[in-house]
Image: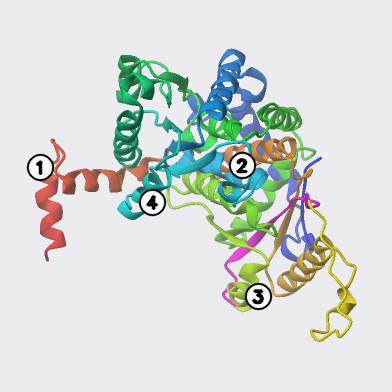
C-alpha cells in the first residue's frame, strides 16, 4: 500500500511535530469528511469513489465503446482540470507515445488548452481522412480557450458527417442543468455527462471529466475507481496511519521552516502530465492570501543534467517529493559488448530498473547531503488501481494542506483577473471602460 516518509527526518525536522500538529490535522480531516470547512460545498470528491453515479458510469463505458467502434481519434476539448487529469492518466498508463503506438483504440488529441493557431491547425490536419469524435468539457461552455476550439472541431464534424452524423459523435461533459454548453447540447441532441456541482475542476479526474477520455484508451476505469476507493477508506482514519496525514504534515512543517518551493519528481517520463495535474491541484488550492508552497516539477534523470546543479548547490528554497512507481512493465537488460569500448560491461546483465533505482538512491543521498529534504511517496505499483490510490491520496492531502494554511482549498479567485483583462482587450460587451483603461496602460 502507498506510503510516505521524509528521508533523514531528524536532519530537516529535528523537533517532534506529530503530537502538536495532530489536533489541527484532525480538525482539517473533519472539515473534509463533513464538508464543514471553507469551500465545503466542493468536497463531493471526498466520498466519490464510493458514491459515484453508477448509471452514468455505465453510460461512460458504453459511450467509450461506441467511440472505439466508430472512430480512429477522439478530440478532447478542455483546459486546466478539464484535461490535465485525463492526459496524466493516459500518459502514465498507456505511454506519452500513445498516439504513435499500434493499437486497437483511437488516438486521443487534447485541444482547447491554449490559443495557438498552429497547434489547432496541426490537429485538424491530423484528422484529415480520419473518422473522429469530440468530447467537449466545460462547466459553463463559455471558457474562451475550449469554446473557441469547439467551434472549429464542431464545424469540422458537421462538414464531414452533416449535422445528423455529427450529433452521434459529440459528447458534452458539462453542468447537469444550466450553462451555455448544456443548453446547446440539449438543443442539438448531443449525449451529455455531468461536471458535478460539488466537485471543482482540479478534483474532477475521477468523474466523467476524466473517465470518458481515459476509458476510450482501454484503461480499466473500474480498477482506477477501485484503487481510489481503497485510499478513501485509508484516509477515513483520522491518524498518522493515513499517508495523506503524513504528507500534509511534512510539507506544512517544511513550509514553516522556510521552504517555499516543492519539486515533484519522478523517474518515469510517463509521469510528466501527472505532475502537471498535481501542479494545478496544489497551486490553485493553496496559492492565495500570500501563502502556499510554489509547486514545480522535474523529470529525473533527464533534469539531473539541467536542473541538477541548482538543486544540489543553489539557494536552499526547496524540497523534493519523489514519487516511486515501482517496477517497469517491460524488463530490459544491458547487453554485453566484447570490446567494452564504453566501459559499461560492469552493467552487463543488469536491468534498466536496477540502474534507475541506483540512480534514484544516489540522487537521494546527494540532494539530502546538499541540504534538500526529500519526501518519498512509495506508490503501490504502476497499474490503474495503484494510480487511483495515488490520485485520491494527493487530493486528500491537498485538502488537508489547505486547511492547515487556513485558506479555502476549493476556490480560485485569482484566476479571474487575467480573464477580465482578456475580455476587455478582445472587446467583449460590458468591458468597454476597462478596455480603454488597459489600452492606455499598454500604450504608455
Label 2 with label 1: CB-CB less than 8 Å: no
Looking at the image, the residue that sits furthest to the front is 129
Alpha carbon distance from label 2 to label 1: 42 Å
Q: Quadrant of residue 90?
A: top right
Q: Is residue 406 visible?
A: no
Which badge, 2 or 1, comes first in the chain's sequence?
2
Magenta stretch holds residue 229: no
Q: Nearer the viewer, residue 118 or 205?
A: 118
Which badge, 2 or 3, comes first in the chain's sequence?
2
Residue hosting label 3:
312
Q: Which-is-in-front pick, marks 2 and 3?
A: 2
Numbered circle sitting on residue 122: 4
Looking at the image, how many numbered discs can be counted on the residues? 4
Q: Write the residue at 37% across / 52% down.
A: 119
Tell whether 275 sits left or right of 179. right
x and y, in percent, of residue 284 in the image: 47, 45
x and y, in percent, of residue 427 in the image: 14, 43
Range of magenta residues: 314-329
Q: Is residue 96 visible?
A: yes
Which badge, 3 or 4, comes first in the chain's sequence?
4
Magenta stretch holds residue 320: yes
In the structure shown, which secondary structural element does the residue marked by tag 4 occupy?
helix
Numbered circle sitting on residue 432: 1
Q: Quadrant of the N terminus?
A: top right
Residue hosting label 2:
89
x and y, in percent, of residue 91 in the image: 61, 47
Amino acid at each position: 500500500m502507498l506510503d510516505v516518509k521524509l528521508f533523514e527526518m531528524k536532519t530537516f525536522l529535528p523537533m517532534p511535530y506529530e503530537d502538536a500538529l495532530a489536533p489541527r490535522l484532525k480538525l482539517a480531516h473533519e472539515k473534509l469528511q463533513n464538508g464543514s470547512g471553507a469551500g465545503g460545498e466542493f468536497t463531493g470528491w471526498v466520498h466519490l469513489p464510493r458514491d459515484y453515479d453508477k448509471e452514468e458510469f455505465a453510460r461512460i463505458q458504453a459511450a467509450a465503446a461506441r467511440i472505439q467502434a466508430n472512430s480512429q481519434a477522439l478530440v478532447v476539448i478542455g483546459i486546466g482540470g478539464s484535461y490535465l487529469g485525463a492526459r496524466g492518466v493516459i500518459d502514465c498508463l498507456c505511454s506519452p507515445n500513445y498516439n504513435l503506438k499500434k493499437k486497437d483504440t483511437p488516438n486521443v488529441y487534447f485541444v482547447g488548452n491554449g490559443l495557438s493557431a498552429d497547434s489547432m491547425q496541426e490537429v485538424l490536419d491530423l484528422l484529415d481522412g480520419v473518422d473522429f469524435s469530440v468530447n467537449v468539457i466545460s462547466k459553463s461552455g463559455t471558457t474562451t480557450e475550449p469554446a473557441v476550439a469547439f467551434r472549429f472541431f464542431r464545424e469540422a464534424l458537421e462538414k464531414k458527417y452533416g449535422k445528423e452524423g455529427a450529433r452521434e459523435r459529440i459528447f458534452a461533459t458539462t453542468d447537469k442543468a444550466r450553462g451555455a454548453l448544456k443548453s446547446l447540447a440539449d438543443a442539438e441532441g448531443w449525449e451529455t455527462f455531468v461536471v458535478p456541482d460539488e466537485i471543482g475542476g482540479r478534483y474532477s479526474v475521477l468523474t466523467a471529466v476524466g473517465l470518458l477520455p481515459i476509458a476510450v484508451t482501454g484503461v480499466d476505469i473500474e480498477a482506477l475507481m477501485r484503487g481510489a476507493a481503497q485510499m478513501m477508506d485509508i484516509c477515513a482514519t483520522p491518524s498518522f496511519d493515513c499517508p495523506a496525514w503524513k504528507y500534509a504534515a511534512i510539507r506544512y512543517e517544511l513550509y514553516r521552516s522556510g521552504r517555499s518551493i516543492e519539486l515533484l519528481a519522478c523517474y518515469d517520463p510517463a509521469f510528466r502530465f501527472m505532475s502537471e495535474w498535481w501542479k494545478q491541484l496544489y497551486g490553485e488550492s493553496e496559492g492565495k492570501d500570500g501563502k502556499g508552497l510554489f509547486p514545480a516539477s522535474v523529470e529525473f534523470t533527464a533534469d539531473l543534467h539541467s536542473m541538477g546543479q541548482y538543486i544540489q548547490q543553489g539557494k536552499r528554497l526547496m524540497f523534493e517529493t519523489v514519487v516511486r512507481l515501482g517496477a517497469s512493465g517491460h524488463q530490459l537488460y544491458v547487453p554485453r559488448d566484447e570490446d567494452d569500448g564504453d566501459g559499461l560491461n560492469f552493467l552487463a546483465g543488469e536491468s534498466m530498473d536496477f540502474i534507475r533505482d541506483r540512480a534514484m538512491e544516489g540522487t537521494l543521498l546527494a540532494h539530502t547531503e546538499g541540504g534538500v529534504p526529500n519526501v518519498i511517496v512509495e506508490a503501490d505499483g504502476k497499474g490503474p488501481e495503484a494510480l487511483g490510490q495515488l490520485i485520491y491520496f494527493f487530493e486528500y492531502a491537498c485538502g488537508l494542506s489547505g486547511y492547515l494554511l487556513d485558506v479555502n482549498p476549493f476556490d480560485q479567485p485569482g484566476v479571474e483577473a487575467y480573464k477580465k483583462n482578456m475580455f476587455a482587450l478582445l472587446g467583449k460587451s460590458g468591458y468597454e471602460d476597462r478596455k480603454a483603461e488597459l489600452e492606455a496602460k499598454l500604450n504608455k
